[in-house]
Image (spheres, rainbow, N blue to C red):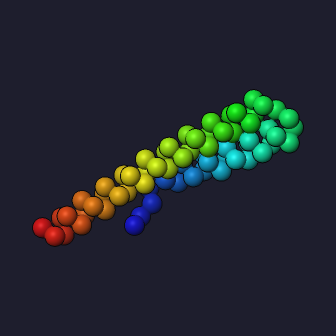
Amino acid sequence: MGINKDQVEGRVKEAVGKVQETAGKAVNSPQQQAKGLANQVAGTAQKTYGDAKETIKNTVKDQQKQG
């Protein structure tokens, strides 16, 4: 199984969101916390989309091999 751009970017967005949320908590900024949570959700969605694309690609390859 390979890895695609959406999977990588999604994981990065998740990580950035976690850091942003933690920083928001540290400085008592509800806005930063909310932005961090939003980035995490967006990252999770993009990662899931990338996972689905990879699964479909692998399924098509397997079907082509079977012939």
Residue 12 location in percent, x, y?
60, 50
Taking depth in this image into account, of 44 and 10 the one nearest to the observer is 44
Looking at the image, which residue is at 24% across and 66% down? 62
Q: Measured along the vertical axis of the image, is residue 57 above or below residue 22?
A: below
Farthest residue, direction top: 31
Q: Is residue 34 visible?
A: yes
Whole-percent x and y of residue 67? Answer: 12, 67
Q: How many marks?
A: 0
Nearer to the camera, 11 or 41: 41
The residue at the point 66 percent across, 39 percent down is 37
Q: Is residue 59 left or right of residue 66?
A: right
Outermost residue to the bottom = 66
**66 vs 32: above or below:** below
In the picture shown, does residue 16 fall above or below 3? above
Whether residue 9 is visible to the viewer of this picture, yes or no, is no
* 67 sits left or right of 54 in the view: left
Residue 45, position as x, y percentages in the image: 50, 43
Q: Vertically, is 4 above or below 13?
A: below
Rendering coords of residue 20 (x, y %): 73, 42
Residue drawn at 82 percent across, 40 percent down: 25
Picture quarter with the N terminus: bottom left
Location of residue 35 (image quadrant): top right
Give the residue at the far right of this rendering: 27
2 sits to left or right of 36? left
